[in-house]
Amino acid sequence: MNKLQETIEKYGLPIADKIQGNRYISAITNGFSMILPIIMMGAIFTLLSSLQIGPYQDFVSATGLKTVFSYAGSFTTDLLALFTVYAIAYQFTIGRGYQKDAAFVAPISMVMFLILIPMGVSKTTEAGEVVNIGAALSTGFLGSKGIFTAILVGIISPTIYLFFIERKIVIKMPDSVPPTVAKSFSALIPGFVLLFIFSLIRYGFSFTSFGDFNSWLYALLEKPLAAITNSPVSFIILIFVCQLLWSLGIHGYMVIRPFLQMVYLPLAVDNLAAYAAGETIPNIICYYNWATFVAVGGCGGLVGLAILMAFCSKSQRYKTLGKISLPSVICNINEPVIFGAPIVLNPVFFIPFLFVPIVSFILSYVLQLTGILPYLSGVALPLGTPVLLYGWLEGGFAVLVMQVVIILLQVIMYYPFFKVADKQALLEES
Amino acid sequence: MINIVLFCAGGMSTSLLANKMRTAAGEKGLEVTIEAYPMTQLEVVGPTADIILLGPQIRHQKGKVTEAFPDKPMAIIDMAAYGMIDGKKVIDQVCSVLGI
């Protein structure tokens, strides 16, 4: 066992570190964390306006509160790409060690993102007349459809900017000028070059059949991306990797989160927009399927195991751990069980730990496919939201019931393995 | 006053431990401040720390900490103590690292 652990420490940890320490991946992850409050605020207002409870709907409609609550969504989740580019550019600059420049790079990158979107919107009226409005910015690519452009610009724009800063190709001010003022002058040359480059890109794309950069990138990525997201297999692979890392004692979710966010967060935003508009929710799998169906009680689905420990233990050790860990797993914090049971490098719990989340996911996917369970509304909820409440807010009563079913499933699947571990612990105690 | 800074992925599970550690430190008569943060706050709160503790689940990020703060004492929290949210044991670990 010690030998195995040594091997993992030697080869496994550097790989996890490489993924997470990668400056591009960590900029994306940290950027998304930075805008999480915006996503959540928007989601809460969307819930307040769209929560499907009859008397509540009557109340908010009659008082006009529904309209008041509906404004927030248009300026939070619907403009998500705009905030994403700011946040990723900011985090990327900080990650490169240029804390003081981040305050300039982030807004400049936002300009680069905006410049790729042509002005003007056109609409066909009911009479079949095409109306063009020149002084308008289409919001089509400012939301979830623009996330990929936002990620690209959020990384490319700071890279070009820092190219100049690193080589000191900047306007220098005498020492008597306050540093903040001097910094804003040093932003001029790289800012100018950036604007020129991005203007050229926009100009270039206006000659293509796509018309603009976003339409091109979207057309390029739409098909391969749809192939990934429509298939449950990619989600299962992510679960598998996450569980494998956790069973080595590494925060697996933190390692796979960037991929989950990049691919499935835009889908959640689409779901939320449809939910707010009262339309059919488009995506069966989105970012929040993870917390709702896969990680009920944190990665590994540990509510069931904590219940077993708290109520069915013969050993003192597991009884104590059950009492300590039950409140935290209910809030999706799994570390006490992971390190307390322990699940880390423990062959006894390896099998259920790997398969409980996968089975829960497949079951929920099939039930969604057959229409028994609804597609999730994609409401962004804080990580510590207790299970059951989480399910209810994501998809109503049916999903709450599903979470109960999943917890029962966890209890059943962990039971035989828990018995073995409990017996061992009891032997050690006597 | 010793400033102990704990890091984990989201700053949640370490915050459970931080509470227990405060109690344990109080019983021991140690004057400490203990706060838990997500790893993303490393650059922000790291400079004021007297000792940095990492949750075992992010021990692969140790390199990042030693690179950013090569002279600061740091330790990976003992797995068993972390699991049982055993504040006393972790305070003992801090004491042995700092040599007090």
Image: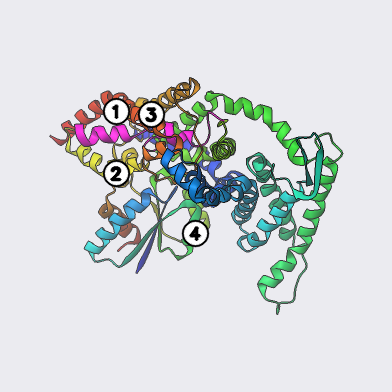
Distance from Cα at disc 1 to Cα at disc 4: 44 Å
Q: Residue at x 75, y 37 (%)?
A: A215
Amino acid on which the number 1 mark rests in the picture: Val
Between marks 1 and 3 in the image, the one whose residue lies nearer the viewer: 3
Between marks 2 and 4 in the image, the one whose residue lies nearer the viewer: 2
- Residue B85 lies, in percent from the top left, at 29, 48
Do dots 1 and 3 share one subunit? Answer: yes
The N terminus of chain A is located in which quarter?
Answer: top left
Judge whether residue A80 can be spotted in this image: yes
Q: Is residue A310 magenta?
A: yes
Q: Residue at x 81, y 44 (%)?
A: A132
On the picture, is A110 further left or further right than A246? Answer: right
* Chain ID at mark 4: B
Distance from Cα at disc 2 to Cα at disc 3: 20 Å
Residue annotated with mark 2 = A327
Residue annotated with mark 4 = B69
Outermost residue toward the left?
Answer: A430
Q: Is residue A232 magenta?
A: no
The boundaries of the magenta stretch are A283-312
Residue annotated with mark 3 = A402
- Residue A143 lies, in percent from the top left, at 64, 43
Amino acid on which the number 3 mark rests in the picture: Met
Q: Residues within 10 Å of mark 4 (few under 14, many from 20)?
A: some
* Mark before the other along the chain sequence, 1 or 3: 3
Amino acid on which the number 4 mark rests in the picture: Phe
Q: Residues within 10 Å of mark 1 (few under 14, many from 20)?
A: many
Residue annotated with mark 1 = A411
Amino acid on which the number 2 mark rests in the picture: Pro
* Secondary structure under the numbered disc 2 in the rendered image: helix
**Is A200 or A39 nearer to us in this picture?**
A39
